Image (tube, rainbow, N blue to C red):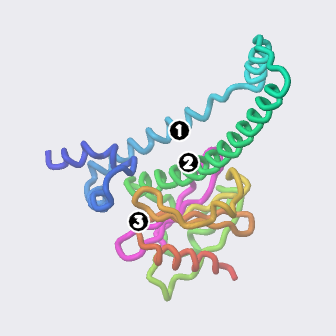
């Protein structure tokens, strides 16, 4: 088969583990091959189902308390005098350092999970035969379409004097939170614009509001008026900044 070589590398591509040049080649191939695009969509959806299932089962507070109770009930060897003080001090230092390290990793893991899910949504949407539910280049058609479908409103910019064009939008979800997913086009590339309520995201939005690199995509995000915006696309950082500037100026 012509696509056999591509299909054997599809999982590696979706995990972002191919070298940069091969990632770009694969991006171009998926855009023009309906068979590989369909396979990519199926596997991205499977990844999301697995992620959702992994978050569904969380130990109850009673289970944690029972573990603590059993640990406390185990006999320990008594440490006397200064040895006991030294051991307690070392334990406190270790526990404090561990807590700080864990919190740091948790913050990074949460960010990576959010950006990873949105990157998967971007890939799955572009691989779909129907990437948008409202197909229009007119913001006055797209914006009203979302009314009653998501629990917030947003403004869209005028694009007459820019390189960007609006393709349309759809309702999407991050976890259980509904949001807007807009598709913009610049030259031959598509950029996903995700908008969600800021309160639905874990952690501090200001810490997350910075350009990052997720696999072969550029990602840029910021918060404004209680909403969190995230752009995902395989375009230059300059294109991302230009579209972000238009969105930030919308409605002003």
Query: The C terminus lies in which quarter of the figure?
Result: bottom right
Quarter-of-image position of residue 197: bottom right
Taking the image as drawn, is residue 240 in sight? yes
Do tag 3 and tag 2 residues touch (Cβ < 8 Å)? no
Q: Position of residue 138 (x, y in %)?
A: 53, 75
Image position of 91 (left or right of 247): right
| Location of residue 125 by image quarter | bottom left
Which mark is drawn over residue 234? 3
Magenta-colored span = 166-191
- Residue bearing the label numbered 1: 51
Q: Is residue 240 above or below residue 61?
A: below
- Name which residue lies at 68% across and 52% down: 201
For label 2, the SS is helix
Classify mark 3: helix, strand or loop: loop
Label 3 packing within 10 angstroms: few (<14), some (14-19), many (20+): some
User: Mark 1 Cα within 10 Å, few/some/many (few <14, many 20+)?
Assistant: some
Q: Are marks 1 and 3 in contact (CB under 8 Å)?
A: no
Residue projecting furthest to the front: 82
Q: Helix, strand or loop at disc 1?
A: helix
Nearer to us in this view, 206 or 86: 86
Q: Which residue is mark 2?
A: 113
User: Marks 1 and 2, how far apart in space?
Assistant: 9 Å
Query: x and y percent of residue 2 in the render?
Result: 15, 49
Query: Residue at the location (57% across, 63% down)?
Result: 230
């Amino acid at each position: 088969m012509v696509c056999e070589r591509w299909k054997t590398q599809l999982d590696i591509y979706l995990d972002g583990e191919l070298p940069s040049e091969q990632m770009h080649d694969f991006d171009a191939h998926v855009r023009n091959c309906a068979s590989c695009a369909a396979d990519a969509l199926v596997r991205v959806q499977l990844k999301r189902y697995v992620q959702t299932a992994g978050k569904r089962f969380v130990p109850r507070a009673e289970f944690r308390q029972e573990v603590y109770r059993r640990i406390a009930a185990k006999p320990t060897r008594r440490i006397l005098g200064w040895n006991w003080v030294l051991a307690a001090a070392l334990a406190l230092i270790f526990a404090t350092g561990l807590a700080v390290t864990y919190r740091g990793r948790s913050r990074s893991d949460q960010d990576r999970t959010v950006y990873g899910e949105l990157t998967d949504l971007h890939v799955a949407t572009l691989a779909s035969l129907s990437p948008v539910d409202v197909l229009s280049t007119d913001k006055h058609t797209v914006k009203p379409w979302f009314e009653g479908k998501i629990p917030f409103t947003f403004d869209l910019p005028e694009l007459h004097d820019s390189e960007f064009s609006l393709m349309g939008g759809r309702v999407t979800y991050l976890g259980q939170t509904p949001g807007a997913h807009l598709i913009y086009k610049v030259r031959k590339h598509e950029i996903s614009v995700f908008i969600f309520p800021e309160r639905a995201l874990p952690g501090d939005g200001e810490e997350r509001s910075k350009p990052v690199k997720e696999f072969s995509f550029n990602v840029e995000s910021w918060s404004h008026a209680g909403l969190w915006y995230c752009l995902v696309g395989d375009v230059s950082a300059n294109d991302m900044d230009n579209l972000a500037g238009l969105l930030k100026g919308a409605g002003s």
